[in-house]
Image (tube, grey):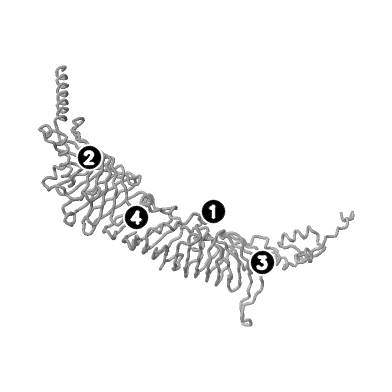
């Protein structure tokens, strides 16, 4: 055993000494020439080696070259500090230098796609050797490299860093695989081009691409040709955990609130230098599925997205609309980022059989979205909501105060109970309504816009009821017992035949100029203010009992009038009858009210009356109090 160990050590020492001797005997010129021939066969370009060339045998036979550059004399190519070329051992023992692989350490190169074809690091992408010799070509490897991706007609340049890749020639094509960092995201991928020679002759070659990164997977299988630029067509599939993260990495700032989560895309793709077309498109986003087609092209130097998408059912509950108030009742106070629309123009047709937003459901929806010249418009041509038909237009554009908003819309034959309860939380009106409105506002946030809205609206409601109070019973009770208003008057419902209302919007409030509620036994008129920003009411009105028309009277006549106030939040306003009027109608309390305003009324009594009526005696009727006489013992 000792002899075997000593013999093995001696053999290793002799072999190492022989390799060391060979490094001294092989001329540097032969080393340079061998690497130059191999690089030229693998890339089609003769390298320029300005540094030293050294042959080493440990830990494996390899040639190390310093300061090497590859280019075709027209464009910049690969610049690398060091190239390591591994050498096949058996040919080396016979004095021949054959390169097995070429490793580029920390290279900087470019991948260019233009009208002339594809170039890697300034080198033409074509088979650099006859087919029968390609099997002997060395494998090309990149270690810790950087690649600039340049596409003709696109000003921006993407840079891939930390590139670890290998390129190998097959009989007719090229295979590349590796990993890299794209915008701080690690990605692994493979590229296979079936026939490089076909690309050189402007014919089609099969191509497969696979990319997989953090929460993202993409596959493409189709064909590639260069005819006045790259022509790509095939099947594209993409899956990801978050569309929000992907758009952010692409430089597209997504909305701040809600949605844009898991997504998948499957489509036939056609790419040319002038357009990118997705046909037979199927896309899933946040559980919503849509089908159609999209085309992205450049028009006058700007990106232009055009297409059609249709869906059976869409749930938009996850998406926070800027017009929906928060739980606290305040409208969203986050800036509206119109600058996100400046990067492209848009012409998109949308349709859906059903759309769900929280508890609200919209059916038979058809709309068009457009953006051009800094103006975004949404035209709803058809939509069924709250049982009625809706049409409208929304325009959003840059303004001096932030964003300018214009809305024109109409809703016919809709259920008032459903509409008011789902949009505002108000559950006090029933009936079938017709609503039209036109609004304008400006501001940096939805809250500011709501506070600045101006415009007008009209509403007509037929065959309905006011829920929560029976005005007829209240009026008849107060007619008999005026002071019974201190009891709880809530409960019941007031049927009506028609409500007609006209409103004017100004500075975030609704000026209700004229509201009329008519029924066979009741007539109510209202006017006042409803604040959109604060979501509260301050209305003053008169409710009247009416005696129906008879044979002797051609028109209804009023029997009893009661002024009242309607105040408080939209969801639960307070009904406050006019106390002064009720006290006047009370036979027992009316003299007390008159006495409270007399000169000789004690302050204690007067204060009680004032607390009941909410009125103070006028200066004309107010006089200094006279001291009361001291009570007699009997009075005590």
Q: Are marks 1 and 3 in contact (CB under 8 Å)?
A: no
- Look at the numbered disc 2 and give the secondary structure of its residue: loop
Q: Where residue 39 sits in the image (x, y, percent)?
A: 18, 43
Q: Quadrant of the N terminus?
A: top left
Classify mark 4: residues with Cα within 10 Å, few (<14), some (14-19) or many (20+). Answer: some
- Mark 4 or mark 2: whose residue is earlier in sequence: 2
- Mark 3 or 2: in front is 2
Classify mark 1: residues with Cα within 10 Å, few (<14), some (14-19) or many (20+). Answer: few
Q: Where residue 386 sits in the image (x, y, percent)?
A: 46, 65
Q: Are marks 4 and 3 in contact (CB under 8 Å)?
A: no
Relative side of 222 to 11, left or right = right
Q: In terms of depth relative to the viewer, which is nearer, 324 or 152?
A: 152
Residue 303, compared with residue 88, is above or below; it is below
Q: Where residue 590 sits in the image (x, y, percent)?
A: 75, 66
Q: Are marks 4 and 2 in contact (CB under 8 Å)?
A: no
Q: Quickly name the residue at label 2.
A: 50
Q: Where residue 328 sits in the image (x, y, percent)?
A: 54, 53
Relative side of 37 to 312, left or right = left
Distance from the alpha carbon under mark 4 to that under mark 2: 55 Å
Q: Quadrant of the C terminus?
A: bottom right
Q: Are marks 2 and 1 in contact (CB under 8 Å)?
A: no
- Mark 2 or mark 1: whose residue is earlier in sequence: 2
Q: Quickly name the residue at label 3.
A: 477
Distance from the alpha carbon under mark 1 to that under mark 4: 33 Å
Q: Quickly name the residue at label 1.
A: 328
Q: Quickly name the residue at label 4.
A: 284
């Amino acid at each position: 055993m000792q002899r075997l160990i000593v013999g093995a050590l001696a053999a290793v020492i002799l072999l190492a000494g022989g390799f060391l001797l060979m490094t001294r005997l092989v001329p540097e010129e032969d080393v340079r020439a061998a690497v130059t021939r191999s690089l030229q066969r693998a890339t089609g370009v003769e390298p320029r080696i300005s540094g030293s060339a050294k042959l080493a045998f440990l830990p494996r036979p390899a040639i190390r070259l310093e300061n090497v550059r590859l280019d075709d004399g027209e464009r910049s190519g690969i610049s690398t500090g060091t190239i390591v070329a591994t050498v096949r051992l058996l040919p080396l023992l016979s004095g021949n230098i054959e390169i097995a692989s070429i490793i580029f350490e920390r290279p900087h190169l470019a991948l260019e796609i233009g009208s002339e074809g594809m170039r890697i690091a300034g080198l033409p992408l074509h088979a650099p050797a006859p087919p029968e010799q390609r099997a002997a070509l060395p494998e090309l490897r990149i270690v810790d490299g950087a690649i600039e991706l340049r596409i003709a007609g696109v000003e921006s340049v993407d840079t891939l860093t930390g590139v670890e890749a290998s390129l190998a020639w097959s009989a007719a094509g090229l295979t590349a695989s590796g990993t890299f960092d794209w915008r701080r995201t690690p990605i692994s991928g493979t590229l296979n081009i079936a026939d490089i020679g076909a690309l050189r002759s402007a014919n089609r070659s099969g191509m497969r691409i696979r990319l997989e990164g953090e929460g993202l997977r993409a596959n493409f299988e189709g064909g590639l040709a260069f005819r006045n630029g790259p022509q790509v067509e095939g099947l594209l599939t993409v899956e990801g955990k978050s569309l929000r993260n992907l758009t952010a990495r692409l430089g597209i700032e997504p909305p701040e609130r809600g949605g844009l989560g898991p997504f998948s895309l499957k489509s036939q793709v056609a790419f040319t230098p002038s357009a990118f077309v997705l046909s037979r498109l199927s896309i899933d986003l946040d559980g919503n599925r849509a089908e159609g087609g999209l085309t992205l092209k450049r028009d006058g130097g700007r990106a232009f997205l055009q297409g059609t998408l249709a869906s059976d059912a869409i749930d938009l509950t996850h998406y926070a609309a800027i017009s929906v108030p928060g739980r606290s009742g305040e409208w969203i106070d986050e800036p509206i980022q119109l600058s996100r629309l400046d990067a492209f123009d848009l012409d998109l047709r949308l349709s859906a059989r059903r759309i769900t937003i929280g508890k609200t459901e919209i059916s038979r929806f058809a709309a068009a979205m457009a953006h051009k010249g800094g103006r975004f418009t949404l035209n709803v041509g058809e939509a069924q909501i709250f049982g009625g038909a809706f049409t409208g237009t929304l325009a959003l554009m840059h303004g001096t105060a932030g964003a300018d908003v214009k809305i024109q819309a109409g809703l016919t034959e809709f259920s008032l109970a459903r509409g008011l309860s789902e949009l505002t939380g108000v559950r006090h009106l029933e009936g079938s309504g017709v609503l039209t409105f036109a609004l304008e506002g400006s501001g940096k946030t939805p809250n500011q816009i709501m506070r600045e809205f101006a415009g007008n609206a009209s509403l007509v409601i037929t065959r309905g009821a006011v829920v929560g109070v029976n005005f007829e019973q209240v009026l008849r009770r107060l007619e008999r017992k005026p002071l019974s208003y201190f009891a709880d008057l809530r409960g019941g419902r007031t049927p009506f035949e028609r409500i007609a209302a006209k409103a004017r919007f100004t500075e975030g409030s609704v000026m209700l100029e004229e509201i009329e509620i008519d029924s066979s036994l009741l007539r109510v008129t209202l006017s006042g203010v409803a604040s959109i920003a604060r979501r509260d009411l301050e209305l003053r009105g008169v409710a009247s009992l009416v005696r129906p028309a008879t044979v002797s009277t051609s028109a209804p006549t009023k029997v009893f009038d009661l002024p009242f106030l309607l105040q408080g939040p939209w969801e639960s306003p307070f009904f406050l009858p006019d106390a002064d009027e009720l006290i006047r109608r009370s036979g027992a309390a009316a003299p007390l009210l008159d006495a409270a305003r007399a000169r000789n009324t004690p302050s204690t009594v007067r204060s009680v009356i004032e607390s009941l009526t909410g009125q103070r005696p006028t200066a004309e009727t107010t006089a200094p109090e006279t001291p009361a006489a001291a009570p007699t013992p009997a009075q005590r």
